[in-house]
């Protein structure tokens, strides 16, 4: 009798696996392709994706080492291996079309993050989406922060000419965030009624060391004439602060308003110390959560509707809102 019972139990277990084992088997596999693991903001975004996916998906992640050809191969390999959906941070946003076509061939969903594909490319495939931020909104916010500093600190107009002399550190040319943040920061200053003179602008490719290099060269050329530094991201802003510190700023009463974007951990420290005047919060948590939720819904073949995905979607693009942060240690 005992033996019969044991056999029955074994049969029952094979026929009806326990719920935990079943759930484990059904976890979708997500392939995550990152343009470059060395990027500070992207590192925090990837951390969120990993954390968010922990209980709900199996992740395979790849570093594209800033090389689009390598990333194309990685995406193809993931599709061949049978992943259920892809989350891709493309190296070159204009190459997204190839990745979309590849995903289409395998009929797998593809959710882009951080580097926005062209709208016409996204429109080619019903399972292609983008999750990011609105760079125009962030640009406007950074310009408004610069204007706010000038309004609240009359001495900021050092030469008293009624014009804000500024320098601008730009991210990677062609990246929508670099182009539109730059354009809309200048637009906001104009909208705020401030007269500006851009003394210099340089692409520092999102990197702190290049931000430092470019700022050192701005200081060489324009020195004391510079009244404000606007940067497309925090890493470059922190690089500018490194160069400014080397030139004697942020000690005694020598100050320079520097404005970044992202609110990364090191930037928050600089805000707390008062060397970074302000930044625009680029919500990695919001973007990571939305990207994973969307990829999983699509992987399961479920409908993307407000009940299943409570985010605003326009033309298959999800923008997570941004906000401003100002240091409370401004002299
Ligand atoms: C971030 C930058 C980052 C870039 C990478 C931007 O949205 O603000 O810090 O380097 O994305 O693509």
Image: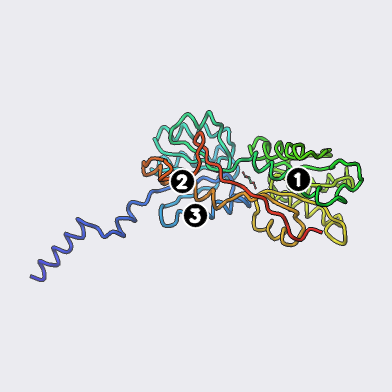
The residue that mark 2 highlights is 310
Question: What residue is at 51 percent from the left and 36 percent from the top?
Answer: 314
Report if the CB atoms under discs 1 and 2 are less than 8 Å apart.
no
Pointer 2: residues within 10 angstroms few (<14), some, or many (20+)? Answer: few
Q: Which quadrant of the structure image shows residue 68?
A: top right
Q: Measured from the top left, where is residue 136 in percent x and y? A: 65, 38
In depth, the one of 304 and 63 nearer the eye is: 304
Say which element carries label 2.
loop
Marker disc for residue 230 = 1
Residue 214 at x, y percent in the picture: 79, 45
Q: Quadrant of the C terminus?
A: bottom right
Number of the front mark, 2 or 3: 2
Q: State if disc 3 and disc 2 touch (CB < 8 Å).
A: no
In the image, taking residue 228 as reference, residue 142 lies left or right, namely left
Q: Which residue is identified by label 3?
A: 50
- The 10 Å Cα crowd at callout 3, few under 14, some 14 to 19, many 20 or more, is many
Of the residues tagged 1 and 2, which is closer to the observer? 2
Q: CA distance from mark 1 to mark 3?
A: 32 Å
Q: Position of residue 18 (x, y in %)?
A: 26, 60
Residue 308 in picture, x, y percent from top left: 41, 45
Q: Is residue 119 visible?
A: yes
Real-space Cα distance between discs 1 and 2? Answer: 34 Å
Q: Is residue 73 above or below residue 7?
A: above
Sequence order check: which comes first, mark 1 or mark 3? 3
Query: Is 277 left, or right, of 9 in this rendering?
Result: right
**Residue appearing at x 77%, y 42% in the figure:** 168
């Amino acid at each position: 009798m005992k033996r019969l019972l044991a056999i029955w139990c074994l049969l029952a277990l094979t026929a009806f696996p326990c719920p935990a084992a079943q759930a484990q088997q059904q976890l979708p596999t997500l392939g995550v392709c990152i343009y470059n693991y060395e990027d500070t903001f992207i590192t925090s975004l990837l951390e969120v994706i990993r954390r968010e996916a922990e209980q709900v998906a199996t992740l395979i992640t790849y570093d594209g080492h800033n090389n689009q050809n390598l990333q194309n191969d990685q995406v193809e390999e993931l599709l061949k291996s049978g992943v259920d959906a892809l989350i891709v941070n493309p190296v070159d946003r204009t190459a997204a079309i190839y990745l979309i076509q590849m995903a289409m061939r395998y009929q797998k969903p593809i959710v882009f993050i951080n580097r926005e594909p062209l709208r016409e490319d996204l429109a080619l495939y019903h399972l292609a989406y983008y999750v990011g931020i609105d760079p125009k909104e962030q640009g406007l916010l950074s310009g408004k922060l610069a204007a706010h500093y000038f309004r609240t600190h009359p001495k900021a107009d050092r030469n008293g000419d009624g014009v804000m002399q500024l320098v601008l550190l730009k991210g990677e040319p062609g990246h929508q965030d670099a182009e539109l943040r730059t354009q809309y920061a200048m637009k906001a200053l104009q909208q705020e009624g401030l007269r500006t003179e851009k003394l210099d602008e340089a692409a520092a490719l999102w990197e702190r060391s290049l931000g430092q290099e470019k700022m050192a060269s701005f200081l060489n050329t324009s020195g004391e004439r510079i009244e404000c530094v606007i940067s497309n991201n925090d890493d470059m802003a922190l690089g500018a602060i490194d160069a400014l510190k080397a030139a004697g700023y942020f000690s005694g009463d020598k100050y320079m308003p520097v404005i970044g974007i992202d609110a990364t951990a090191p930037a928050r420290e600089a805000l707390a110390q008062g060397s970074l005047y302000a930044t625009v919060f680029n919500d990695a948590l919001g973007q990571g959560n939305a990207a994973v939720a969307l990829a999983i819904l699509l992987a399961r073949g479920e409908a993307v509707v407000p009940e299943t995905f409570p985010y605003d979607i326009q033309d298959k693009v999800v923008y997570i809102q941004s906000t401003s942060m100002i240091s409370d240690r401004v002299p």
